[in-house]
Amino acid sequence: MTFEDLGLSPALLSAIADAGYEKPTPIQEGAIPVALTGRDVLGIAQTGTGKTASFTLPMIERLSRGRARARMPRSLVLAPTRELAAQVADNVKLYAKNHKLNMALLIGGVSFEPQKKILDQGADILIATPGRLLDHFERGGLLLTGVEILVIDEADRMLDMGFIPDIERILKLLPPRRQTLFFSATMPSEIKHLVDTFLRDPERVEVARPAQTADTITQYIVRVSDNQARTKREALRDAINRDGVKNGIIFCNRKRDVDIVARSLQRHGFSAAPIHGDLDQNQRMKTLAEFKSGELRLLVASDVAARGLDIPAVSHVFNVDIPRNADDYVHRIGRTGRAGQKGEAVTLVSSEDNKALAKVVKLIGQEPAELKLDGKAQPAPAEAAAPASEEPKTASSEEKPKSRRRSRSRNKPEAEAPAADAPKAETVSERAPAPEKTERKERPARNERSSRQDRKDRYDRHERDLSPVGFGDHVPEFLLRPALP
């Protein structure tokens, strides 16, 4: 099947050809014809299979007729992260270059004013994160009563990130007669009732088993000796130094660990930079652009980069931590092996990660092969024990001179101890009281008074020596005038 068979217009087909796409992916073959008819679509496909084009192409086709009014967008695309929203906007620009459609991107971390100006002009396609969308609505910047098409991208991630209240509120602001396109890589049973609420008699398009990893990705695990972060960082460097590692995305569970791993790689001469939700939006976009262009070799990220980001030619994905949610493992390793290219995913596993690994294995239905590294980060058991035994020796050798000096007087023969130590003890006992006697001679009067009398004397001395503060010996004339009767 070709894109011509999907029922798209010549202007859209021309833009697709210019983008270099020849054949639609399975999810595009199933979703685009249904979406063009106006029906609701529930699309489930593994990451990297072209879900973004599955809703942007039919949306552009349907919006090609008509114009938007000020502050009343005709379509709404909700994305869980700023990066994913920006990526959808890039795809819309690419596919809609032959159409006169206005697009607005509403994401946090940037100024309100440019976004407000675009909304005032009228936006045919509005792409937003839930938080910033509601901010503009509460400020009176837009109305959602004219939305004809709603798209919820990476729906499971939206729900996992706690956007359920925001999504429910947004849905109440939309007109009841609308088309809803619901796309996700996984569809847990916990959100099925929400899907039933959002969609009306949807066409389910499922091209792969939920949580199935792509066949183009070779998966490995690397066993480390313990759960110390330093050991994992050493194993990570050894895994990166292997042949064939062109570039890679390194995932950590916590934002703090993202910064730590990035600094560690930079200190060891690697081209690496962090990206997570606490960074400034401009910095995040700059780092992502540098990684896409090849200026940056390693991108150390939290799960903000795990969902939906289309970064071409990523050769490797490294998991410093196994994700808390097993579904996120599928999304993380899906950053490599995209568009038919080969990729590798390497996950570092310690003894404390075995339970999390078991959940991942159960989810994907296979156990990754174990990868042996030749570097320092993965020593043999005997070699691993050696440094531990050497460290105490080194520490004790540093302390030996002190302990030897302390023990000389204690461990001497009994015959020598009385002769050598007794005179010294007597001398010390005779000299110790000397400073106290001298001190008493210098201040005999002070020690004879009681503490109460001493305080009284100090108070009296203070009263006697007290002089007017600020006047000195001079008394102003107004103080010398007699008081009025």
Image: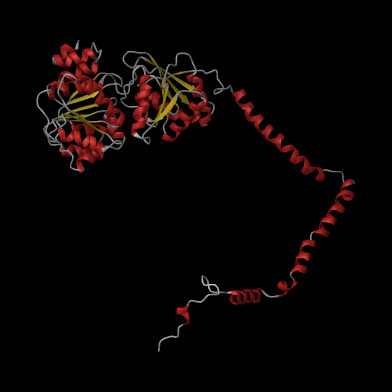
Can residue 333 be seen in the rendering of this structure? no
Counting from the top left corner in percent of width and height, residue 388 is at 63, 30
| Residue 266 appears anywhere in the view | yes
Figure quadrant of the N terminus: top left
In the displayed structure image, the side of residue 461 where residue 34 appears, left or right: left
Q: Residue at 39% across / 19% down in the picture?
A: 294
- What residue is rendered at 37% in x and 21% in y? 365
Q: Quadrant of the C terminus?
A: bottom left
Residue 139: give x, y in percent of width and height: 20, 43
- Is residue 442 placed above or below 38 in the rendered structure? below
Q: In this view, does 335 lie above or below 444?
A: above
- Left or right of 20? Residue 215 is right
Question: Seen from this angle, which residue lies furthest left?
Answer: 66
Rendered location of residue 116, percent (x, y): 20, 37
Query: Taking 153 as reference, is 215 above or below it?
Result: above
Way the structure is coloured:
secondary structure
Q: Residue 423 or 474: which is nearer the viewer? A: 474
Q: Quadrant of residue 462?
A: bottom right
Residue in front for this viewpoint, 19 or 5: 19
